[in-house]
Amino acid sequence: MQSSLEDRGFGVDKPYIDLTPEGGWGQPVVDFIGESAWVAIDEFVKRRANGACELCGASPVAQGFMGKRAHLFCTEPRFAYDETNKVATLKRLVNVCHQCKNAIHFCQTALKTKQLQTGRGPLFEAVARLSKFHNLTESQVYDWARKELSIWERRRAMGFPQRFDFWIIMDGTNRLWGK
């Protein structure tokens, strides 16, 4: 099912902060293709990654970059953003462990956990993961998150995105069913 249009190298080397577009927090890929198609794609991506996180290398049987195993995984979409045309284009699907997912969605992790002052829990682990992978201090990680948030505030003010482009899924699905 891999699409010839999927860019397997797009942003796939370490956890990153990727704020989801407003309106995209409700899993826009699932909303577009439906739950059963998403389950099939999710299973395909997990098999393709041999059950390991494509960012940190953790799996149920092997420790990853952070020295831990992982048991929960999800498929994370990676988008390229065209601000001129206000389009978010799906470029890549990545199998990630939940710890890397918490790092990717740093601000959502902070909002969900409300642990800014406690110094432990998912937000603390996200900061530690981003710090180690990118050789940053905790303060630099928070600065990075604030910068990403300001980018999304500017994009939201200009009505971005107006549409999502999921061609890589449509192309892969059409080839899978011989269309």
Image (cartoon, rainbow, N blue to C red):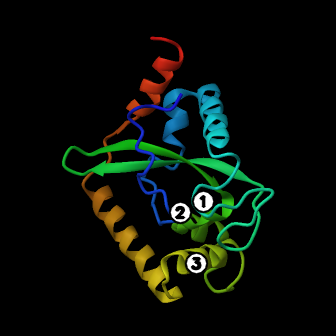
Res 179 → quadrant? top left
CA–CA distance between discs 3 and 2?
10 Å
Pinpoint residue 155: horizontal percent, then vertical percent.
29, 58
Foreground of the two, 93 or 50 = 50
Pinpoint residue 27: horizontal percent, then vertical percent.
54, 43
Q: Is residue 122 above or below residue 58?
A: below
Q: Alpha-carbon neighbours of circle 1 within 10 Å: few (<14), some, or many (≥20)?
A: many
Q: Secondary structure at mark 1?
A: helix
Q: Secondary structure at mark 2?
A: helix
Q: Earlier in the sequence, mark 3 or mark 2?
A: 2
Identity, as a three-letter code, of the amino acid under mark 2: Ile
The answer to whether marks 2 and 1 mark residues whose Cβ atoms lie closer than 8 Å is yes
Locate the N terminus and report the quarter of the image it occupies.
top right
Foreground of the two, 144 or 130 = 130
Residue displayed at 61% across by 80% down: 128
Pinpoint residue 46: horizontal percent, then vertical percent.
66, 42
CA–CA distance between discs 1 and 3?
12 Å
What residue sits right under mark 3 in the picture? 127
Q: Alpha-carbon neighbours of circle 3 within 10 Å: few (<14), some, or many (≥20)?
A: many
Q: Is residue 54 above or below residue 42?
A: below
**Residue 35 at least partly seen:** yes
What residue sits right under mark 1 in the picture? 101
Pinpoint residue 93: horizontal percent, then vertical percent.
51, 44
In the orientation shown, which residue stands out farthest toward the left? 84
Q: Alpha-carbon neighbours of circle 2 within 10 Å: few (<14), some, or many (≥20)?
A: many
Residue displayed at 57% across by 67% down: 103
Res 148 → quadrant? bottom left
Point out which mark residue 104 bears: 2
